[in-house]
Image (tube, coloured by chain):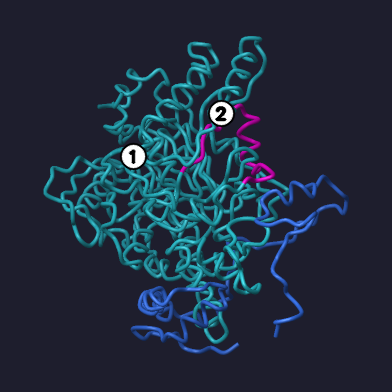
């Protein structure tokens, strides 16, 4: 991982926004891309204030208190039935979530 | 109109403890209280848009069961029969849980959140789900997919967010308590905008099991109420370890209810208290906020508290820290909304990527998509170190600042928000909106507990925000909030001090809308 400087330009390029959208599994319209180019850049410029803080030698803190694993006993407990688990499925096929074909013809 | 005047006008009593006692002594039945609550919610919802769903039949049935148990002289819980509203990002095995998002429209949870089970076993009547900023991302209640929520003090203004409907419901006198969640101020800022008490507990104090995740290292559930003793009561039922939440704290909860006794409520108990005043909280506020903050300091001093100057130089950088960490966690948490197992799925998807991307783009609103994009960006290759890692380093420094400050004082006092409630639609720029959270995000970043209390009423002709549009008509007075912050796991002490503060300032008046009938 590099320590690239933050991007402080007034706007992001269309390619940058489309790349991030792809990573985020979003399909923005042309209008949304244009808006994000400006608004995301404005937010990024604001959060670049972080660069003004001297953080040398400071350990990152991912959560407020030191975390330790809480291990549960390895015992079976109650769980959802297939019908409960599938109750909110947009598309169901028997006891499965139905999805478009992933492999095979037409796939890369 | 005083709170006492409000209590005379309603059979529901002056606050939750009052109503609970009336139900226990059979001065009013839980069924009647619940019916009155549902009626008022039905009546005011077209104006306020506070509720997404009301669960009348189930609530009345449970209320009758509580009444029957009380009639038989059975032991009932500390919340027996009192109606409480819950934010729509807390899952219930009845009704739907939508997070005010189209992507979860119609979602029915197969299980109850831990706090839902705890409140119900204490006898609470959970009668409805409140509207919120979509996935709790917002400071105004305007990003709700079901339309903006309105402030009972002035329905052209926002109630604050993200726990917008919860604040509006309590401020309008529909119920005495509602649950919110607070990731960067989402309980405290709406409490401030609505003249309520809003408690954000210490990180890990209340189980997050069944709270739809936004920023997992920041989120906490807490109450919005009319009085400090009510906040203590509701919090005490929810607090404590839960093995289903691996970040749930094992520290003892103490006795928040006992801490709010008559002795605590006497402002004489403020004598000798060391109240930290950060110089960073003294500038950049609405003049009315500055004036009431100054009045609170003078009153505390008058009651014998010692005002201690403390320094929190990273206060404003906290916003930058928060708006890196929270979106980073959010984009990861919201990856689960993929149109496969639950939630919205696009019609006629092509391949799997198309299904994901179109389902998400159709289901999420503008602010949620913006934060997902932001979070994805700051976590992406080449930017991770400059943004995310650095934000986590600053997070540690912010926590150290609080530690240093709390070595010199018992609590830190400041405004909850820099302005009173602004007009709906008046803040269009995301960065301006984010600055609303300048006094609240750092408690989440550091994991400490904090409470917003009623601080007084101000005039605000402009309407705040950028445009000031809508001015010209006479504006009603608006409430502002004052925040007390305390070290981690000191809820009982924080609430005791809050009790004294509440007595010193006086309880908030009742919003004018609550006199509609």
Q: Nearer the viewer, mark 2 or mark 1?
A: 2
Mark 2 is surrounded, within 10 Å at the Cα level, by few (under 14), some (14 to 19) or many (20 or more) other residues, namely many
Q: Residue at x 61, y 68 (%)?
A: B349
Q: Is residue B43 left or right of residue B22?
A: left
Q: Does B47 sit above or below residue B321?
A: above
Q: Give the quadrant of the C terminus of chain B.
A: top left
At which x and y percent is residue B264?
44, 32
Q: Quadrant of residue B239?
A: top right
Instruction: State the extent of the magenta-drawn residues as a range.
Output: B108-130
Instruction: Find residue B363 and name its label.
Output: none
Which of the chains is cyan? B
Pick out the residue farthest to the left. Answer: B472
Q: Chain of mark 1?
A: B
Mark seen at residue B125:
2
Dot 1 crowding, Cα within 10 Å, few <14, some 14–19, many 20+: many
SS class of the residue under badge 2?
strand
Residue hosting label 1? B195
């Amino acid at each position: 991982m590099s320590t690239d400087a933050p991007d402080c330009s007034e706007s992001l390029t269309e390619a940058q926004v489309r790349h991030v959208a792809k990573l985020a599994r979003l399909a923005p319209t042309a209008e949304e891309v244009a808006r994000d180019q400006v608004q995301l850049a404005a937010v990024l410029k604001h959060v670049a204030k972080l660069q003004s803080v001297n953080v040398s030698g400071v350990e990152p803190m991912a959560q407020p208190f030191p975390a330790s694993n809480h291990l549960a006993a390895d015992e079976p407990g109650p769980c959802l039935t297939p019908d409960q688990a599938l109750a909110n499925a947009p598309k169901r096929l028997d006891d499965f979530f139905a999805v478009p074909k992933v492999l095979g013809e037409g796939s890369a | 109109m005083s709170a006492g005047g409000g209590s005379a006008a309603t059979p529901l009593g002056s606050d939750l403890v009052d109503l609970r006692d009336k139900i226990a002594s059979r001065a009013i039945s839980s069924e009647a209280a619940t019916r009155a609550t549902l009626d008022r919610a039905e009546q005011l919802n077209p104006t306020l848009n506070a509720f997404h769903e009301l669960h009348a039949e189930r609530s009345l049935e449970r209320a009758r069961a509580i009444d029957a148990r009380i009639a038989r002289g059975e032991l009932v819980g500390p919340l027996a029969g009192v109606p409480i509203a819950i934010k729509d990002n807390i899952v219930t095995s009845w009704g739907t849980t939508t997070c005010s998002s189209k992507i979860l429209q119609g979602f029915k949870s197969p299980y109850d959140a831990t706090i839902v089970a705890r409140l119900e076993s204490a006898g609470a009547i959970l009668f409805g789900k409140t509207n919120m900023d979509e996935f709790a991302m917002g400071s105004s209640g305007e990003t709700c997919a079901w339309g903006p929520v309105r402030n009972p003090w002035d329905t052209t203004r926002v109630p604050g967010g993200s726990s917008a409907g919860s604040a509006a419901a309590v401020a309008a006198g529909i119920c005495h308590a509602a649950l919110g969640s607070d990731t960067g101020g989402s309980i405290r800022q709406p409490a401030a905008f609505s003249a309520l008490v809003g408690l954000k507990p210490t990180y890990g104090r209340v189980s997050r099991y069944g709270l739809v995740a936004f920023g997992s290292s920041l989120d906490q559930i807490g109450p919005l109420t009319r009085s400090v003793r009510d906040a203590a009561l509701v919090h005490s039922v929810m607090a404590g370890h839960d093995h289903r939440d691996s970040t749930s704290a094992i520290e003892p909860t103490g006795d928040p209810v006992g801490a709010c006794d008559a002795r605590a409520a006497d402002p004489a108990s403020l004598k000798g208290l060391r109240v930290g005043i950060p110089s960073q909280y003294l500038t950049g506020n609405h003049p009315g906020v500055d004036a009431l903050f100054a009045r609170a300091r003078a009153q505390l001093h008058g009651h014998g508290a010692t005002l201690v100057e403390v320094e929190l130089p990273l206060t404003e950088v906290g916003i930058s820290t928060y708006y890196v960490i929270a979106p980073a966690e959010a984009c990861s948490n919201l990856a689960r909304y993929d149109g496969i197992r639950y939630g919205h799925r696009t019609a006629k998807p092509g391949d799997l990527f198309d299904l994901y991307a179109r389902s998400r783009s159709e289901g999420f609103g503008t602010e949620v998509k913006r934060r997902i994009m932001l979070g994805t960006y700051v976590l992406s290759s080449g930017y991770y170190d400059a943004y995310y890692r650095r934000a986590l380093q600053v997070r540690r420094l912010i926590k150290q600042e609080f530690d240093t400050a709390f070595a010199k004082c018992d609590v830190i006092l400041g405004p909850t928000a820099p302005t009173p409630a602004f007009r709906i639609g008046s803040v269009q720029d995301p960065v301006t909106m984010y600055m609303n959270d300048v006094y609240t995000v750092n408690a989440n970043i550091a994991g400490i507990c904090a409470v917003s209390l009623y601080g007084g009423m101000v005039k605000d002709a402009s309407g705040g925000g950028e445009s000031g549009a809508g001015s010209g008509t006479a504006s009603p007075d608006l409430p502002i909030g004052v925040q007390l912050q305390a070290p981690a796991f000191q809820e009982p002490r924080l609430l005791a001090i809050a009790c004294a503060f509440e007595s010193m300032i006086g309880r908030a008046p009742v919003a004018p809308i609550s006199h509609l009938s």
